[in-house]
């Protein structure tokens, strides 16, 4: 049906703005049904099979410009409709894409997000969490979790604050992540099929599950064929260009033959690796292969397009917010693991394909 405009809308308030009754009348439903459809969760009185009704109500609300009175709703539900988000740094394109998914889903469900950068520093993480809790957020999406014991998670549990991890996992905490172990194996299998046997790893930070899982998957795949990377060719690094540069420099200075391929667990570290190799006069894709991880939009547009493992970044953010809202509504919070995929480009394939000497 065509939605009326302006003063032709029914049940406007004194200021001429659409009300919940406006949306309900146009959708042909009871106001309580419209209210539930526009809340953070699916309406309890509407069957799963009628999700089309929910979407229709939400679409009408958007078209007429209806905005819930969050203050009044908060008085009824004891919620602030604020969700806190902690990330290492939003200048990182990977984290920005994850946050975009979080924020879009939050706004779609009537929430606002408050985001803070922690720079992966323990003291700053604790301070920023205190800031979020002072804002009385209903729950927290944590994008900087530690793989092993995490004091911040202990604090959240002690204060009974609902939380979800995104991108990184930790113990049995509810999380939405990529299957990074599978992604590491994908990178390895690609290089194995191209004939590479002596390989190196720019391994990221060991406190992050993303780095640990990607490295473990990669190393296990090469161990399966009897060619695990030597320990001095697996180098920890920061998740940025400078970290990739330092790690690549260390790899090139290691004793023994140079590797024929390098796997960087993060695209920015891979870009730093490319810079060092270029400065050394090495032709990537011919003399040495490089593959990254996450497949940021920039990866395919570099002067030498970068092969990368694509991680569903936006979907992780959306899923994390969905999971947090489910928990806030008293539902079970079941972790989700999304699947990666390979994007092979010239940095591993070269312009003319792999050298004959590197074929299996």
Image (tube, helix red, strand yellow):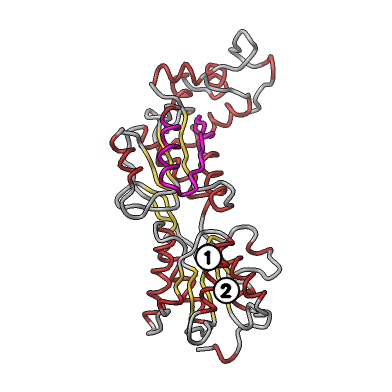
* Disc sitting over residue 290 in the figure: 2
Q: Position of residue 230 (x, y in %)?
A: 41, 80
Mark 2 element type: strand
| Residue 82 percent location from the top left of the image | 47, 30
Q: Is residue 149 left or right of residue 178?
A: left
Which residues lie in the magenta part? Answer: 105-133
Q: Earlier in the sequence, mark 2 or mark 1?
A: 2
How many angstroms separate mark 2 from mark 1 (CA)?
A: 12 Å
Q: Position of residue 163 (x, y in %)?
A: 37, 39
Q: Secondary structure at mark 1?
A: strand
Looking at this rendering, what residue extends furthest in the right direction? 303
- Looking at the image, is mark 2 or mark 1 nearer the viewer? 2
Q: Is residue 81 magenta?
A: no
Residue tagged 1: 309
Eyeballing the image, is 360 above or below 347? below
* Residue at 57% in and 73% down: 290
Label 1 packing within 10 angstroms: few (<14), some (14-19), many (20+): many
Q: Is residue 120 left or right of residue 358?
A: left
Q: Position of residue 310 (x, y in %)?
A: 53, 62
């Amino acid at each position: 049906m065509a939605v009326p405009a302006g003063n032709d809308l029914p049940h406007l308030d004194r200021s001429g703005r659409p009300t919940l009754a406006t949306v309900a009348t146009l959708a042909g439903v009871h106001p309580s049904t419209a209210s539930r459809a526009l809340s953070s969760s699916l309406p309890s009185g509407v069957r799963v099979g009628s999700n089309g009704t929910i979407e229709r109500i939400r679409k009408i609300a958007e078209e007429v410009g209806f905005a819930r009175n969050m203050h009044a709703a908060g008085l009824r539900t004891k919620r602030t409709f604020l969700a806190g988000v902690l990330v290492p740094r939003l200048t990182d394109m990977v984290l920005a894409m994850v946050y975009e998914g979080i924020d879009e889903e939050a706004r779609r469900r009537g929430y606002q997000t408050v985001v803070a950068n922690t720079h992966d520093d323990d003291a700053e993480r604790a301070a920023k969490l205190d800031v979020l809790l002072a804002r009385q957020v209903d729950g927290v999406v944590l994008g900087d979790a530690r793989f092993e014991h995490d004091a911040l998670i202990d604090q959240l549990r002690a204060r009974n604050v609902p939380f979800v991890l995104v991108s990184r996992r930790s113990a049995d905490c509810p999380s939405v992540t990529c299957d990074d172990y599978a992604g590491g194996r994908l990178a390895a299998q690609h290089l194995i099929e191209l004939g590479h046997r002596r390989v190196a790893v720019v391994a990221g930070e060991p406190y992050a599950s993303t780095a640990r899982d990607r490295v473990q998957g990669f190393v296990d795949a090469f161990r399966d064929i009897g060619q695990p990377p030597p320990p001095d060719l697996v180098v920890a690094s920061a998740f940025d260009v400078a970290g990739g540069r330092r790690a690549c420099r260390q790899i090139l200075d290691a004793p023994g033959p140079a590797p024929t391929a390098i796997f960087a667990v993060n695209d920015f570290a891979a870009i730093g690796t490319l810079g060092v190799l270029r400065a050394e006069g090495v032709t990537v894709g011919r003399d040495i292969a490089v593959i990254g991880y996450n497949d940021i939009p920039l990866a395919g547009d570099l002067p030498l397009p970068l092969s990368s493992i694509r991680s569903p970044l936006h979907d992780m953010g959306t899923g994390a917010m969905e999971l947090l809202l489910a928990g806030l509504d008293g539902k079970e919070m079941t972790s989700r693991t999304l699947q990666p995929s390979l994007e092979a480009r010239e940095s591993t394939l070269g312009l003319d394909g792999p050298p004959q000497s590197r074929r299996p």
